C-alpha cells in the first residue's frame, strides 16, 4: 500500500510571483535612482529562476478533469469537481457484492473492489459525453491473478458500450484481451456503430506474478492526431528509465487510427452508462475480479509526458489529487524566492542608507 499524502500548501508560486512583481514595480517607481546595475543583476537572478520554474504540464490541470474517483470514506470522496458540479458514482451488485475495500489500495485507505458481476456505474452525465472531442481515461488497477475463478473472456475494465455484443457497437472500452486462462493483457477499443478501432493489447503482470501489483492504465482518444492510444504500466516499468517504451519492460504504448471515425462521437448510447467492471448496459456479461483506485476522466487528450508524470509520481506515493492540488515549489523556485527576497532586502538597506 502507498499512503496518500494529505499535505496542503498555502503558497502558490504563481500568486507569489504576482506579489513579488507588484513589490518590484512599487520599489522601482519610488526609488529609480537606487536601481544600481548590481541590484538589477540580483533581482534579475530571482526573476530568471522563478520564471524558469516548472509549473506543471499543459494537460494536468483541474480545468481538464471531468471526473475523479478516489473511493475513500466509503465512496464519499468520489465526487467529480470540474465543470457541471458533482456526480456521485453508484455501486451495482450482481451476485457477489461489490464494494469498497481496504485489502488492496494504491493510495489512501480504500479502493473499489469489483467481483461476481458487480460493478461501479459513473452514469452518463453530460460532462462525460465528449462528443467529437478528445478525452482521456486514467486509473490504477490491481488484479490478484491472470484469471481469477469466474473471470470471463475479454472482460470489461471500464467502458460505455455493449462490448459483449460486438466491438463495432458505438462507444469505447478498455478490456482484458483473449482467453480467460491468460487474461492479463489489456486493449482499447472505440467504435461508431459500424466502424471500429482497436489498439493492440499490452501485457500486464498481475499480483500473482513476480514483480506484479498495481498497474497504471490509460486510454486516450486524440482527435488532433486521429489516434486511439492504449497505455499499460505495471511495476516492471521503472521510473528510473524516464519514459514508457520498448526498452522499459516492453511497455511501449499502442495506438490505432481513428481517421475513419473523424467527427463521430463515442458517447454512450441512450440507456447506457460508463461502468467500471461491466459493459455499458450493465447486463452482467463481464465477470471480473479486480481492484480500482484513483479513476479519472479528462476532457482532453493527455500527452505521453502528462501520463508519465502521473505514473512516475504515483509510484512515488502521490495520488492524482496530490499532483493537481499541491503545487510544491521546486528547488529552483525556492532559489528564485530567496534570490528575489535578497534583492528586495538589499534595496531596502540602500534606501535607508540614502536618507
Image: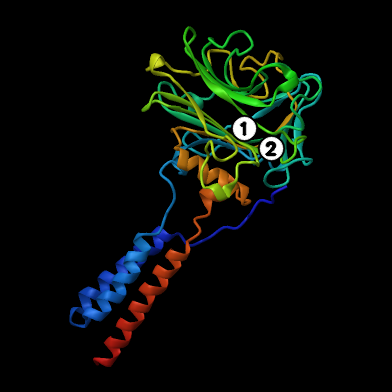
Q: Compared with residue 325, is residue 77 higher up or lower down, i.e. above or below?
A: above
User: CB under 8 Å between callouts 2 and 1?
Assistant: yes
Q: Is residue 9 above or below residue 279?
A: below
Question: Viewed as shown, does residue 342 lie left or right of 8?
Answer: left
The reply, left or right, for residue 262 in relation to residue 323 is left
Between 135 and 214, the residue placed more toward the observer is 214
Closer to the chain start, of discs 2 and 1, is 2
- 205 with respect to 24 (left or right): right
Kind of element beneath mark 1: loop
Residue 121 seen by the camera? no
Question: Mark 2 to mark 1: distance in Å?
Answer: 8 Å
Crowding at dot 2, Cα within 10 Å, few <14 / some 14-19 / many 20+, comes out as: some
- Residue lying at the far front of the rendered structure: 247
Quadrant that contains the C terminus: bottom left
Q: Is residue 85 visible?
A: yes
Q: Which mark is residue 75?
A: 2
| Residue depicted at 71% across the width and 15% down the height | 284
Asked whether 293 or 271 is in front, the reply is 293
Residue depicted at 39% across the width and 14% down the height:
260
* Residue behind mark 1: 88
Front-lying residue, 182 or 298: 182
- Where is residue 115 shown, x and y percent of the image? 76, 25
Residue lying farthest left?
Answer: 33
**Percent from the top left, x then y, of residue 125?**
53, 25
Classify mark 1: residues with Cα within 10 Å, few (<14), some (14-19) or many (20+): some
The residue located at (60%, 41%) in the rendering is 237
Residue 323: percent from the left, percent from the top? 54, 49
Quarter of the image for residue 276 reads top right
Q: Secondary structure at mark 2?
A: helix
Amino acid at each position: 500500500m502507498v499512503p496518500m499524502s494529505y499535505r496542503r500548501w498555502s503558497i502558490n508560486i504563481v500568486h507569489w510571483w504576482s506579489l513579488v512583481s507588484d513589490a518590484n514595480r512599487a520599489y522601482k517607481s519610488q526609488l529609480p535612482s537606487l536601481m544600481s546595475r548590481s541590484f538589477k543583476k540580483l533581482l534579475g537572478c530571482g526573476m530568471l529562476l522563478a520564471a524558469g520554474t516548472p509549473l506543471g504540464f499543459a494537460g494536468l490541470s483541474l480545468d481538464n478533469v471531468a471526473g475523479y474517483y478516489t473511493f475513500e470514506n466509503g465512496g464519499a470522496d468520489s465526487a467529480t469537481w470540474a465543470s457541471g458540479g458533482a456526480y456521485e458514482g453508484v455501486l451495482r451488485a450482481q451476485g457477489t457484492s461489490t464494494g469498497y475495500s481496504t485489502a488492496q489500495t494504491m493510495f489512501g485507505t480504500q479502493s473499489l473492489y469489483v467481483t461476481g458481476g458487480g460493478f461501479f456505474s459513473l452514469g452518463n452525465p453530460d460532462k462525460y459525453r465528449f462528443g467529437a472531442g478528445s478525452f482521456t481515461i486514467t486509473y490504477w488497477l490491481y488484479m490478484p491473478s491472470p484469471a481469477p475463478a469466474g473471470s470471463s473472456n475479454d472482460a470489461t475494465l471500464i467502458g460505455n458500450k455493449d462490448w459483449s455484443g460486438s466491438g463495432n457497437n458505438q462507444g469505447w472500452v478498455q478490456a482484458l484481451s483473449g482467453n480467460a486462462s491468460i487474461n492479463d493483457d489489456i486493449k482499447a477499443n472505440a467504435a461508431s456503430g459500424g466502424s471500429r478501432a482497436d489498439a493492440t493489447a499490452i501485457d500486464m503482470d498481475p499480483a500473482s506474478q513476480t514483480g506484479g501489483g498495481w498497474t497504471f492504465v490509460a486510454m486516450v482518444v486524440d482527435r488532433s492526431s486521429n489516434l486511439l492510444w492504449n497505455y499499460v504500466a505495471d511495476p516492471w516499468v521503472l521510473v528510473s528509465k524516464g519514459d514508457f517504451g520498448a526498452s522499459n519492460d516492453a511497455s511501449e504504448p499502442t495506438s490505432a487510427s481513428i481517421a475513419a471515425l473523424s467527427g463521430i462521437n463515442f458517447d454512450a448510447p441512450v440507456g447506457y452508462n460508463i461502468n467500471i467492471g461491466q459493459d455499458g448496459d450493465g447486463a452482467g456479461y463481464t465477470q471480473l475480479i479486480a481492484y480500482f483506485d484513483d479513476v479519472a476522466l479528462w476532457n482532453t487528450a493527455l500527452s505521453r509526458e502528462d501520463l508519465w508524470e502521473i505514473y512516475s509520481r504515483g509510484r512515488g506515493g502521490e495520488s492524482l489529487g496530490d499532483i493537481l492540488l499541491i503545487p510544491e515549489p521546486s528547488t529552483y523556485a525556492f532559489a528564485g524566492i530567496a534570490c528575489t527576497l535578497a534583492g528586495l532586502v538589499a534595496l531596502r538597506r540602500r534606501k535607508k542608507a540614502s536618507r
